Every structure is written in structure tokens, then in C-alpha cells.
Amino acid sequence: MVVLVLERVPIVLRGELTRWMLEIRSGVFVGTLTPVVRDRLWRRACQEMAGGAGILVYSVRNEQGFSVDLWGDPSRSVVDIEGLRLVEAHLEG
């Protein structure tokens, strides 16, 4: 399973990703992709974000069962606390 969350990206990029994944909410894509297709889509998304941000979550064999990649300046980040990856929200104010 692959989840891709995009923020502040061109609508053309979102449209292109719908060829491969289901957009379940604005900017939130899910799908089952091979690692090769996942990596190619992620690289392309990173190239075309135009100042936006993205978070990629995908299944791997580790303690939590997933890995996370970030690009740009997303409103959330992933922190590693003693080998456990947790999401940290960036609060405005």
C-alpha cells in the first residue's frame, strides 16, 4: 500500500497521479504500486511540486510496517524517537 499526501502543488500533477492512484481527498492519494512505479512517481512529483510539499508513506518490512519520505516544507514532519517514527504537526502562531 502506498499513500501520497501533497500540499500546495499544481493541479496538473494531481491529475497525473490519478492515472496510477485513487485521490480519496484533495491531495491525498492511495494505491498499490510496485516499488519501481512508486519511486518513479515520487521522483516526478518532487520535480513538479513547484514550491509545494509532499509526504510518501509505503509498506516495508520493519517494526512499524511502513516508511516515510518527505519533500519540500510540509505542514507535518516525521521524527524518529528511539527507532519509532512519529508525526509532528507544525502549529502556526
Image (cartoon, grey):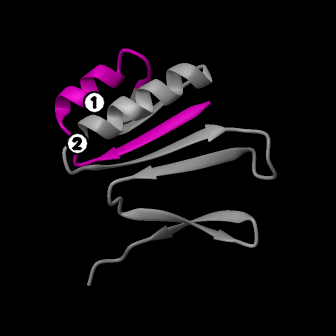
Residue in view at x 27 percent, y 30 percent: 14
Could you tell me residue 90's position as x and y percent? 39, 73
Which segment is the magenta one?
1-22
Question: Could you say which disc has been placed on residue 33 in the image?
Answer: none
Residue in view at x 43 percent, y 63 percent: 76
* Contact check, label 2 and label 1, Cβ < 8 Å: yes
Residue kind at label 1, given as amino acid type: Arg
* In the image, residue 26 above or below residue 37: below
Residue in view at x 35 percent, y 77 percent: 91
* In the image, residue 8 above or below residue 87: above
Question: Could you say which disc has been placed on residue 9 in the image?
Answer: 2
Relative to 62, 77 lies left or right: left
Categorize mark 2 by other alpha carbons within 10 Å: few (<14), some (14-19), many (20+). Answer: some
Of the pair 51 and 90, the residue shown nearer to us = 51
Asked which secondary structure carries label 1, the reply is helix
Is residue 32 in view?
Answer: no
Could you tell me residue 41's position as x and y percent? 42, 26
Could you tell me residue 48's position as x and y percent? 24, 35
Residue in view at x 35 percent, y 24 percent: 17
Residue kind at label 2, given as amino acid type: Val
Categorize mark 1 by other alpha carbons within 10 Å: few (<14), some (14-19), many (20+). Answer: some
Could you tell me residue 2's position as x and y percent? 56, 33
Relative to 80, 6 lies left or right: left
Is residue 23 in view?
Answer: yes
Question: Could you say which disc has been placed on residue 14 in the image?
Answer: 1
* In the image, residue 26 above or below residue 8: above
Residue found at the far top of this picture:
19
